[in-house]
Amino acid sequence: MNNPTVHPSWCDRTLCTADEHRSAPIPLNLNSVLWLPAREGTAWLTEARAPWSCEPYLRLEIGDAHLSMPAGDARRVLDALSTLLTSAAV
């Protein structure tokens, strides 16, 4: 059973609510990306505060677009992209 009063190490207690833990947001510079609704975005982690075990989520906000995915899935996507980018090292 999860203890919702225990904050994850990434949690910014000033941003937590009664319903969720939340990390400090990080800015994303997307100036070189085409076809996005904005050139700057924000990313942060969240996790529901519940008496049962909950998975953290990666949240992205770019203009009016929002993306949310389990952190474990996000890590696999980023690992695959890192492998791909390594093959194109400039």
Image: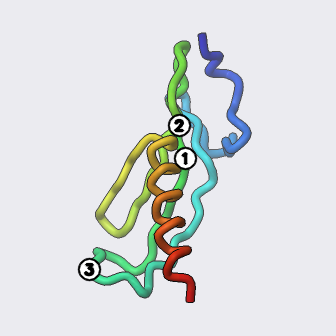
| The N terminus sits in image quarter | top right
Q: Position of residue 48 (x, y in %)?
A: 50, 29
Quarter of the view holding residue 61: bottom left
Q: Which mark is residue 13?
A: none
The structure residue drawn at horizontal position 33% and vertical position 56%, both measured from the top left corner, is 66
Looking at the picture, how far across and down is residue 57, in whole percent? 48, 42
Which residue is label 2 attached to?
56
- Dot 3 corresponds to which residue? 35
Q: CA distance from mark 2 to mark 3?
A: 28 Å
Tell me which numbered mark, 2 or 1, is placed earlier along the sequence: 1
- Mark 3 neighbour density, 10 Å: few (under 14) some (14–19) many (20 or more): few
Query: In the image, is 68 to the left or to the right of 20?
Result: left
Q: Which residue is the site of mark 1? A: 45
- Element at label 1: strand
Instruction: Determine the image quadrant of residue 73.
Output: top left
Identify which residue is drawn at 42% across, 87% down.
32
User: Judging from the image, what secondary structure is the residue with disc 3 in?
Assistant: loop
Tag 2: amino acid: Pro
Is 1 placed above or below 67 here? above
Asked which quadrant contains residue 41, the reply is: bottom left
Q: CA distance from mark 1 to mark 3?
A: 25 Å
Q: Amino acid at mark 3?
A: Trp
**Residue, x 71% and y 24% (percent of image)?**
6
Q: How would you rate the neighbour count of disc 2 (Cα within 10 Å): few for under 14, some for 14-19, many for 20 or more?
A: some
